[in-house]
Image (cartoon, rainbow, N blue to C red):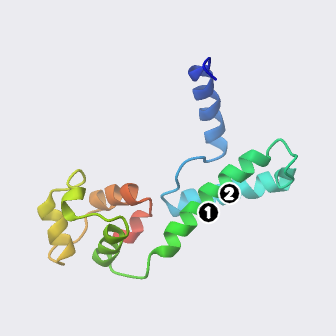
């Protein structure tokens, strides 16, 4: 693998990614697209482990499973409760999120003095791998 042609890999990956999402899913709409792609691959015979698409089916299935596991862990809650829960699950303190917002903003959100803005919700969703809807 020392002679890996990164340009060729990049080109092929980009072409494949337009058809099959092989990255962490963070939005419900991306989840639905991934499930539709998986269904199409299974219909094409990808469930057979000898089929040329079997590895792709397995990889996409793991991406979907990861999203479902993260989504299922979140209890029904307010945005500030969801943030507190995710911070606890990831072992984070307010200061650990200063790359997303000032610590004073995180503190105000957690104390209920401030709502989570759409911009911050998007950043938090990307950080925790969940839907932004969790925070609004």
Give the residue displayed 87% in from the left and 52% down from the top.
45
| Quarter residue 68 falls in | bottom right
Q: Is residue 64 left or right of residue 80?
A: right
Label 2 neighbour load within 10 Å: few <14, some 14-19, many 20+: some
Q: Secondary structure at mark 2?
A: helix
Give the residue displayed 62% in from the left and 17% down from the top.
3
Q: Position of residue 26 (x, y in %)?
A: 48, 58
Q: Is residue 33 visible?
A: no
Give the residue displayed 88% in from the left and 46% down from the top.
50
Name the mark on residue 4.
none
Q: Is residue 129 left or right of residue 113?
A: right
Q: Is residue 41 left or right of residue 70?
A: right
Residue pushed farthest front? 2
Give the residue displayed 18% in from the left and 78% down from the top.
112
Residue pushed farthest top? 3
Asked whether disc 2 touches disc 1, contact meaning CB atoms under 8 Å apart, the reply is yes
| Quarter residue 114 falls in | bottom left
Q: Position of residue 102 (x, y in %)?
A: 15, 56
Q: Position of residue 98 (x, y in %)?
A: 20, 54
Q: Secondary structure at mark 1?
A: helix
Q: Quadrant of the N terminus?
A: top right
Spatial separation of the CA atoms under disc 2 and disc 1: 6 Å
- Up the image or down, 73 lies above or below 48; here it is below
Q: Is residue 24 visible?
A: yes
Residue nearest the viewer, comparing 128 with 44: 128
Residue under numbered circle 1: 65
Name the mark on residue 61.
2
- For the image shown, how many numbered marks are present on the structure? 2
Residue nearest the viewer, comparing 69 with 44: 69
- Up the image or down, 109 lies above or below 29; here it is below
Label 1 neighbour load within 10 Å: few <14, some 14-19, many 20+: some
């Amino acid at each position: 693998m020392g002679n890996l042609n990164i340009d060729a890999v990049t080109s092929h990956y980009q072409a494949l990614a337009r058809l099959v999402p092989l990255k962490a899913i963070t939005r419900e709409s991306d989840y639905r697209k991934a499930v539709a792609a998986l269904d199409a691959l299974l219909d094409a015979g990808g469930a057979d482990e000898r089929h040329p698409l079997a590895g792709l089916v397995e990889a996409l299935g793991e991406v979907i499973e990861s999203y479902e596991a993260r989504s299922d862990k979140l209890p029904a809650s307010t945005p500030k409760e969801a943030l507190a829960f995710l911070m606890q699950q990831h072992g984070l303190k307010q200061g650990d999120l200063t790359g997303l917002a000032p610590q004073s903003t995180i503190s105000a959100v957690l104390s209920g003095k401030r709502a989570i803005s759409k911009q911050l919700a998007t950043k938090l969703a990307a950080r925790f791998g969940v839907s932004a809807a969790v925070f609004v």
